[in-house]
Image: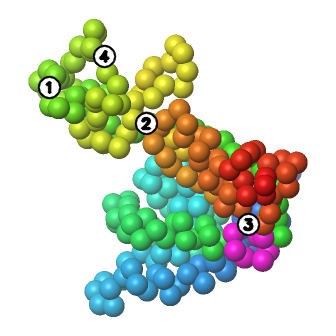
Amino acid sequence: MRGSDERSEGLFSYVSCEARVPATHPLRAIRAIVDEALEVMSPAFEGLYSKIGRPSIPPEKLLRALLLQAFYSVRSERQLMEQLDYNLLFRWFVGLSMDAPVWDVTVFTKNRERLLAGDVAAKFLATVLGQPKVKALLSDEHFSVDGTLIEAWASVKSFRPKDGSGEPPGPGRNGERDFHGEKRSNETHASTSDPEARLYRKGHGQPAKLAFMGHALMENRHALVVDVRLTAATGLAEREAAVSMVEAIPGSCPEAWCLRGPLCSSAG
């Protein structure tokens, strides 16, 4: 018999977020590991917050939300708050009840910046990797290092001579600037809005952009990221970061896969 397409709104719900998440969902195992790491870091959180005043967003919930943003490639924190408002899976993972209000995006961003300023993100990753159940998944024999170009939050028009010479851009918010015939390099020029950014291009025929280099060390056996670095964009940045991250892998490295050559202590 065909069912009726009538919409009925229930006044109460007797099914919790916990019951709606399948027992085999991958986030269940991740949630257990994350909760254990956050419990270890609880004393470190105490030093970042005042003992008086209005309670802020719990750092545990904030870090879980940031993990979801990375897992599901949520483009912005505003969209992340929107997802938390109606996505029951997200609410369960973060630790929000069905009726809990979602935070204002500006408040969320401000609290996130406090954690990043306290190097909490790096400590959190180190704590997760230090858990016995995670160590059992890691191998110091099967890994790879990859780099990517990360565009700086700066316009190419801000890349001006360090000595203060050169014509400024035209009037207006996005004034025109003619670079034809002008030789620019990282030795003589720098961005006025982001001095640490460097002009870099991926290859011949590609446009030069103000950027940084991101590097990730991946354990290949279980596809786990065990280290990440952000460096200046230079021609040697990728190999130098690879050497640095490989040397930080605990344990000895077999010469069969050693890529470090004379820099490696095990190479003799």
For the point 54% across and 66% down, the residue is 122
Nearer-the-camera pick, 132 or 55: 132
In percent of width and height, residue 60 lies at 53, 76
Q: Residue 211 — which label?
A: 2
In percent of width and height, residue 230 lies at 51, 49
Can see residue 88? no
Q: Mark 1 or 3 closer to N-term?
A: 1
Under mark 1, the amino acid is Ser
| Spatial CA span between label 4 and label 2 | 19 Å
What count of labels does the image hold?
Answer: 4
**Magenta-drawn segment:** 129-135
Q: Secondary structure at mark 1?
A: loop
In this rendering, the answer to whether 9 lies above or below 176 is below
Q: Mark 4 or 1 closer to N-term?
A: 1
Pointer 3 residue: 250
| Spatial CA span between label 4 and label 1 | 13 Å
Nearer-the-camera pick, 221 or 33: 221
Judged left or right of residue 151, residue 161 is left
Residue 21 lies in quadrant = bottom right
| Spatial CA span between label 3 and label 4 | 46 Å
Q: Residues within 10 Å of mark 3 (few under 14, many from 20)?
A: few
Pointer 1 residue: 165
In this rendering, the answer to whether 229 lies above or below 186 is below
Mark 4 and mark 2 residues within 8 Å of each other at the beta carbon: no
Q: Mark 1 or 2 closer to N-term?
A: 1
The C terminus is located in which quarter? bottom right
Pointer 4 residue: 183
